[in-house]
Amino acid sequence: MIQSVNLKTLFITLCLVLTLLSIQLLNAQLAIGQPNLGFSQACASESFNSYSVTFAFSPESALDASNQFIVEMSNADGDFSGATILYTSPSGSVTTSPASLDFSIPEETSGENYRIRIKSTSPVATSTPSTSFAAYYKLQDSPFTINNLVSTGAYCTGGSYLLTIDNPGTGNNDSPLNYPSLTFNWYKEISETTAVFVASGPSLSVSEEGTFFVETNYGTCTSNSFSNRVTISEASASGEADATIVSSLGNPYCPEQGLTTLTTLGGNSYQWFKDGVAIPDATGQSIQTDESGTFSVQVNLGVCSAFGSIDLVSELFNSDINVEELNYLIEGETLSIEVINNAVTPEFTWFLNSQVIAGATGNTYNATEFGDYTVVITETTGCEASVIYEFTIEEGFDPFPDVDNIPNMISPNGDLNNDTWILPLQYTTGTNTEVIIYNEQGKVVFQTMDYQNNWPIADLNLTSINQLYYYVITKTDGDVKKGTITVIK
């Protein structure tokens, strides 16, 4: 009887243990539903790379406190064998269903058939994969140039023309070749709105006429990473194709930006001309210049050739100033300066001895001070260029000062002080007064009816320290003045 009771108790205990184990196993099982994507395709870039996924799981009680949910992405073919972890939630942070997680895609992402799945760590569980979606990280997403931005190309009959993506390109061109992971698709234009795929790769050998361009391969993700169009033509051995010339600074161009680069289509050899004259050593695909004129080029394509020209115009305005680099001004006089120009909405800044002259903002200025002057003319519309004029005003010598008396002494030593014999205005030029000067031997050394206050005109070769001369001044009314002049050596 006792043995029967013990067996019964043991059986009841075993049933309780099995029941508890079954409950624990049931609670340990976790089911994760298929992820629901918050997007149709992932077209990421530096400025945007944030996506979300929503999923349900059951039961919530199956989650351990340390559980983490992991967002995994397949390869471009939907295969998870080398899955990429996009996001891992902090331990215990997700406890209720449904849940949403945010993630970003890697820069290497490029394909049309990626999938997402969700995994848990405690307990371990994995969802079924999401629907397929296109995903691309657009490392470069701006227009770029091919063929050095030259819009045409030509090949001889039976030959071909090579189109390449420029690197680094022209101007601020952001060449996609700077990103080795990118691939490219070339197209031939059929109409303004349609094109057909030709080939893939960073270059394209063209042996048929047409207009071609290339795009960075971002699949169904709309992209701004595309090139300019290039029209290719065939030239026979007896004919000559057109060679387009492109100016890197445009045409007209602003010389303030530096030299402009003229580039033509690719060929075997080149010869450039300016205004019909060959430019020495200008035998490359490009030349640089800061001049205006008609530039042309002869391109050797092999058994045929191409020729092109461009009327290059500099937008730098024309200007002139009405004063010399060195000017003389008598104390109390005014020098009127005028800048003549055809600049568009110009601005003028005047300087005296490197200091801005307040209020001087027009194209004219009346100078009364001695010093070093500068005027800067700036074109503020179109080609925003500047022209600078520099000039100096020094104190000048008044050849006809209003003196009271006839001097009897001069010192011609070149110091601009008493260098010449200065007469009162009643005896100088325009008065028809005769002026005669004699040396000590009575020989006439100077005689004029139009005295310019300029004697001695030449070196007198003085033989003594103080040499004496005699003068006779006869006015038209017969009044005569006589005296001596002492010349101090």
Image: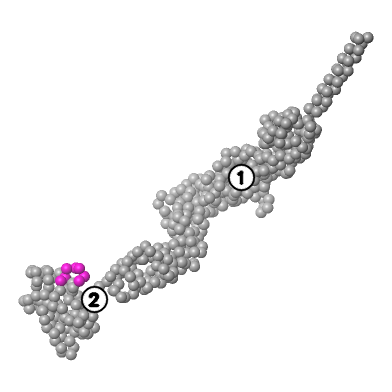
Camera-side residue of 368 and 213: 368
Q: Looking at the picture, which amino acid does disc 1 mark?
A: Glu
Q: Position of residue 139 (x, y in %)?
A: 60, 43
Is 414 within the magenta? yes
Is 97 within the magenta? no
Camera-side residue of 454 and 219: 454
Q: Tell me the quadrant of the picture where the N terminus can be found.
A: top right
**Image quadrant in which you'd find residue 71:** top right
Left or right of 271: which side holds 120? right
Q: Position of residue 438 (x, y in %)?
A: 10, 78
Looking at the rendered structure, which numbered label has been put on residue 46?
A: 1
Camera-side residue of 467 and 295: 467
Residue 168 drawn above or below residue 2: below
Residue marked by disc 2 = 399
Camera-side residue of 443 and 239: 443
Q: Looking at the picture, which amino acid does disc 2 mark?
A: Pro
Label 1's element?
loop
For marks 1 and 2, give the CA distance: 77 Å
Left or right of 163: which side holds 57? right
Q: Position of residue 368 (x, y in %)?
A: 34, 72
Label 2's element?
loop
Q: Which portion, as a residue range, is magenta? A: 411-417
Residue 464 drawn above or below residue 429: above
Residue 446 drawn above or below residue 2: below
SS majority, magenta:
loop
Bin the neighbour count of mark 1 within 10 Å (Cα to Cα): few under 14, some 14-19, many 20 and up.
Answer: few
Q: Position of residue 196 (x, y in %)?
A: 67, 46
